[in-house]
């Protein structure tokens, strides 16, 4: 498995609280992605990064923000968590011109 | 927007039976990838197909890319309990930057011993 870690692995939080999920890679890959996975919806892209401080929106970006200040770290922030953001969040990485993506172990987030 | 449709959503087989999942697009695809996700795990890259009509094999798994590059299939011969999981196809999203993928919703395979 590629060197990708996610923290925390599990989190329960209350509606309205801010939450930050961290993705850390040791592969020095240029591209990083945040997905959410929900039953019946498969994997949906939230945000992605194509370099340090270079990010863009994905399919389901509303309510989420990201930051990438170092190549190895990609942060996903829920400014004010809602119950609809209860999901499993996966980080993924890929290298320039190599389209396969390598996924982290995931973070299970529950918003009560 | 661009979509990839994957069927069936679920498949239950007896161990030893074959299994096929299909991925279809209304637009021509530059390439297609397949991933496997074990229960409780994360998606794992299996293979990428690029050429029209391409066929690739990995042991009991056979991957095909259609001649028109609008569909793809994954066939597993003589399923084993280790094949259990969800299989996703994914295609490049032309509207996004390099590496952005659009995932199908997956086919969940269960294998009865």
Image: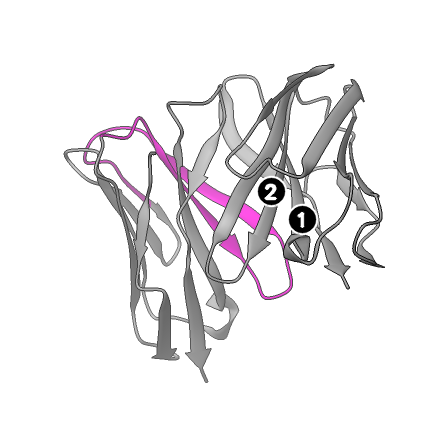
The residue lying furthest to the bottom in this view is B113
Where residue A108 sits in the image (x, y, percent)? 73, 57
Secondary structure of the residue carrying numbered label 1: strand
Residue B93 figure quarter = top left
Q: Classify the position of the N terminus of chain B by image quarter.
A: top left
Which of these two is toward me, B48 or B94? B94
Label 2, label 1: how many angstroms apart (C-alpha)?
6 Å
In the displayed structure, would residue A55 be above or below residue B92? above
Circle 1 is placed at which residue position? A89
Where residue B105 sits in the image (x, y, percent)? 42, 54
Image point (68%, 43%), residue name: A1
Inspect the magenta stretch and tell me whether residue A59 lies in it. no
Give the magenta part as a residue range.
B28-56
In the displayed structure, would residue B32 be above or below residue B111? above
| Residue A35 disc label | 2
Q: Earlier in the sequence, mark 2 or mark 1?
A: 2
Residue A35 figure quarter = top right
Residue B70 figure quarter = top left
């Amino acid at each position: 498995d590629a060197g990708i870690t996610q923290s925390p692995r599990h989190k329960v939080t209350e509606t309205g609280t801010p939450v930050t999920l961290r993705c850390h890679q040791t592969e020095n890959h240029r591209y990083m992605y945040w997905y959410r996975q929900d039953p019946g919806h498969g994997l949906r892209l939230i945000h992605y990064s194509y370099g340090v401080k270079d990010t863009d929106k994905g399919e389901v970006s509303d309510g989420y923000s990201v930051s990438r200040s170092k190549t190895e770290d990609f942060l996903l922030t829920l400014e004010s968590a809602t119950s609809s953001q209860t999901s499993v969040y996966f980080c993924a990485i890929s290298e320039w011109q190599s389209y396969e993506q390598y996924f982290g172990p995931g973070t299970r987030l529950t918003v009560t | 927007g661009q979509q990839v449709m994957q069927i069936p959503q679920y498949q239950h087989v007896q161990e030893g039976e074959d299994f096929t999942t299909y991925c279809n697009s209304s637009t021509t695809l530059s390439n297609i990838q397949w991933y496997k996700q074990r229960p409780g795990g994360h998606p794992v890259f299996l293979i990428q197909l690029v050429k029209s009509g391409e066929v690739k094999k990995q042991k009991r798994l056979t991957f095909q890319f259609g001649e028109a590059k609008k569909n793809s299939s994954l066939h597993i011969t003589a399923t084993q309990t280790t094949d259990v999981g969800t299989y996703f196809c994914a295609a490049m999203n032309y509207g996004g930057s390099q590496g952005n993928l659009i995932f199908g919703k997956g086919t969940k395979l269960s294998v009865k011993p």
